[in-house]
């Protein structure tokens, strides 16, 4: 076996080291429309394609959808906008709406706003992410946390409060925070009940619980949908994917599907459409 030049090995090692992302180094925010924040490494990993539902397919949430879209477009154009909390019933399109309005903003405004997903368990690292974003004031960023809530003994909510409005630096004007939750006030009731039991002024526990949600200028409520809204969702999906089904058969099958699930929601409607498309031998494209 021929001898390998040590100088060549050294050059290869140097090249690989330069290519490897440095821990805590800011990402190239222009290389992708979205990123996922990795708290362990302090690196935001790019996402080339954001999976989601088209804005026009989101039915039964018209007011919330239009409100969030207008807020997002104003922010993307450099105008003042509010942090948003999307709260309420499961499966009604809260996270789908955030991704859909980001897609619409990317189509309407350039440079497009960058969507950064942060996992609920990584909220304590939010200040580190904010520090990286401060160094890119030429772009607009939407930080998104899905299914945000806090349980007993969890103090990471204080990092969120400081990042949203508190702290001496405050939230950068080019950064917005969107969150979804099944709870309107984010903190578990037992957390404030425990604090109230030991507090000198019990009302302070309630204030602590409410003050976190108050950091969000927009509260958008999502409620369980009516039968008419559910059927409108099913019809919209069926038309969009060109499913070969008669209107009467589609309605009857959709209601039977909802009855077996014990619920009506956008998620249930889409799950029905997936099942129907499979039975019809059609693809959802």
Image (cartoon, rainbow, N blue to C red):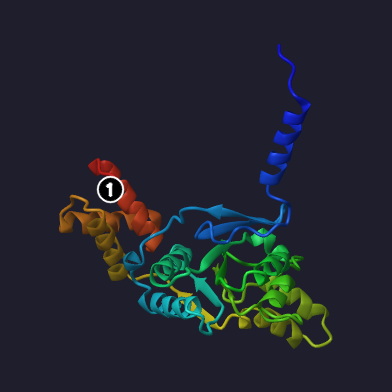
Q: In terms of depth relative to the viewer, which is nearer, 106 or 199? A: 106
Q: Which residue is labeled 1 in the image? A: 276
Please provide percent x and percent y for residue 265.
Answer: 39, 63
* Horizontal side, residue 58 vs residue 46: left or right: left
Q: Residue at x 74, y 17 (%)?
A: 3
Q: Residue at x 52, y 59 (%)?
A: 34
Q: In terms of depth relative to the viewer, which is nearer, 100 or 45? A: 45
Q: Residue furthest top?
A: 1
Q: Quadrant of residue 69?
A: bottom left
Mark 1 is surrounded, within 10 Å at the Cα level, by few (under 14), some (14 to 19) or many (20 or more) other residues, namely some
Across the whole image, how many numbered discs are drawn on residues?
1
Q: Is residue 121 above or below residue 171?
A: above
Please provide percent x and percent y for residue 196.
Answer: 77, 80
* Horizontal side, residue 266 vs residue 207: left or right: left
Residue 125, visible in the rendered structure? yes
Please provide percent x and percent y for residue 90.
Answer: 48, 64
Q: Is residue 68 above or below residue 5?
A: below
* Horizontal side, residue 195 vs residue 141: left or right: right
Residue 263, visible in the rendered structure? no
From the image, which quarter does the N terminus lie in?
top right
Q: Secondary structure at mark 1?
A: helix
Please provide percent x and percent y for residue 147.
Answer: 57, 63
Q: Residue at x 40, y 74 (%)?
A: 65
* Horizontal side, residue 164 vs residue 242: left or right: right
């Amino acid at each position: 076996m021929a001898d390998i030049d040590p100088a060549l090995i050294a050059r290869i090692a140097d090249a690989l080291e330069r290519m490897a992302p440095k821990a805590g180094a800011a990402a190239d925010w222009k290389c992708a429309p979205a990123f996922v924040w990795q708290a362990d490494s302090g690196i935001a990993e790019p996402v080339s394609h954001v999976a989601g539902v088209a804005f026009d397919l989101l039915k039964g949430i018209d007011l919330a959808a239009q409100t969030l879209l207008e807020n997002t477009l104003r922010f993307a154009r450099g105008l003042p906008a509010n942090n948003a909390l999307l709260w309420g019933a499961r499966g009604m399109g809260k996270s789908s709406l955030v991704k859909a309005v980001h897609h619409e903003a990317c189509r309407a405004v350039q440079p497009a706003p960058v969507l950064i997903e942060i996992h609920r368990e990584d909220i304590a690292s939010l200040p580190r992410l904010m520090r990286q974003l401060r160094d890119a004031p030429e772009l607009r960023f939407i930080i998104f946390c899905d299914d945000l809530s806090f349980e007993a003994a969890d103090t990471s909510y204080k990092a969120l409060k400081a990042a949203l409005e508190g702290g001496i630096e405050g939230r950068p004007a080019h950064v917005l925070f969107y969150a979804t939750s099944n709870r309107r006030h984010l903190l578990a009731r037992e957390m404030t009940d425990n604090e109230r039991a030991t507090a000198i002024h019990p009302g302070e526990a309630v204030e602590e619980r409410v003050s976190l949600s108050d950091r969000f200028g927009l509260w958008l409520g999502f409620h369980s949908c009516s039968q008419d809204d559910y059927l409108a969702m099913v019809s919209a999906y069926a038309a969009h994917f060109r499913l070969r089904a008669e209107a009467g058969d589609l309605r009857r099958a959709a209601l039977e599907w909802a009855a077996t699930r014990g619920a009506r929601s956008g998620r249930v409607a889409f799950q029905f459409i997936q099942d129907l498309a499979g039975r019809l031998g059609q693809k959802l494209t």
